[in-house]
């Protein structure tokens, strides 16, 4: 598998992690497995097709893992601090 393909799948996994939970990896990997059926149709060996499927799954999962960091940052930016709200409530009494 070319490094460019690995990078694209990595970015797809990272993009999926920002919007969806981990369950999205199952259909994403399933679609990738269906896409590798082309390799079987071209007459590639079973070992090469299995290795391609494994590398695709790993690339999506690692991309998802690295995409969780921006997801946490985005989530933390939208939540106000609780301490400041409590201080404001105490000050208004």
Image (tube, rainbow, N blue to C red):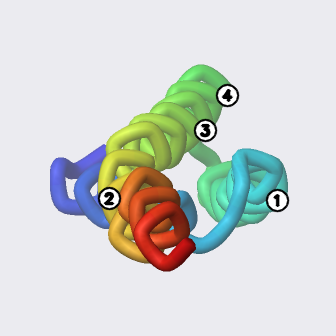
Measure how far apart labels 3 and 2 are at the Cα level.
31 Å
Residue contact at pointers 3 and 1, CB within 8 angstroms: no
Measure how far apart labels 2 and 1 are at the Cα level.
26 Å
Question: Residue 46 has which mark?
Answer: 4
Dot 3 or dot 1: first in sequence order is 1
Residue placed under numbered mark 1 in the picture: 27
Relative to residue 57, is residue 33 depicted above or below? below
Q: Residues within 10 Å of mark 1 (few under 14, many from 20)?
A: few
Can residue 12 be seen? no
Question: Residue 53 has which mark?
Answer: 3
- Residue 6, how many percent across, how many down? 30, 50
Q: Name the residue at 42% across, 69% down.
A: 91
Q: Residues within 10 Å of mark 4 (few under 14, many from 20)?
A: few
Measure how far apart labels 4 and 2 are at the Cα level.
42 Å
Residue sitting nearer the eye, 61 or 52: 61
Dot 3 or dot 4: first in sequence order is 4
Measure how far apart labels 3 and 4 are at the Cα level.
11 Å
Relative to residue 55, is residue 43 depicted above or below? below
Q: Nearer the viewer, mark 3 or mark 4?
A: 3
72 sits left or right of 69 in the view: right
Q: Which residue appears farthest toward the top when viewing the image?
A: 47
């Amino acid at each position: 598998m070319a490094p460019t393909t690995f990078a694209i799948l990595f970015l797809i996994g990272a993009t999926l992690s920002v919007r969806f939970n981990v369950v999205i990896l199952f259909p994403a990997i399933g679609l990738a497995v269906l896409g590798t059926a082309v390799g079987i149709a071209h007459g590639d060996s079973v070992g090469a097709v299995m290795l391609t499927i494994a590398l695709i799954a790993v690339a999506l999962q690692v991309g998802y893992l690295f995409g969780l960091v921006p997801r946490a940052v985005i989530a933390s930016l939208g939540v106000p601090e609780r301490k400041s709200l409590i201080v404001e409530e105490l000050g208004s009494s």
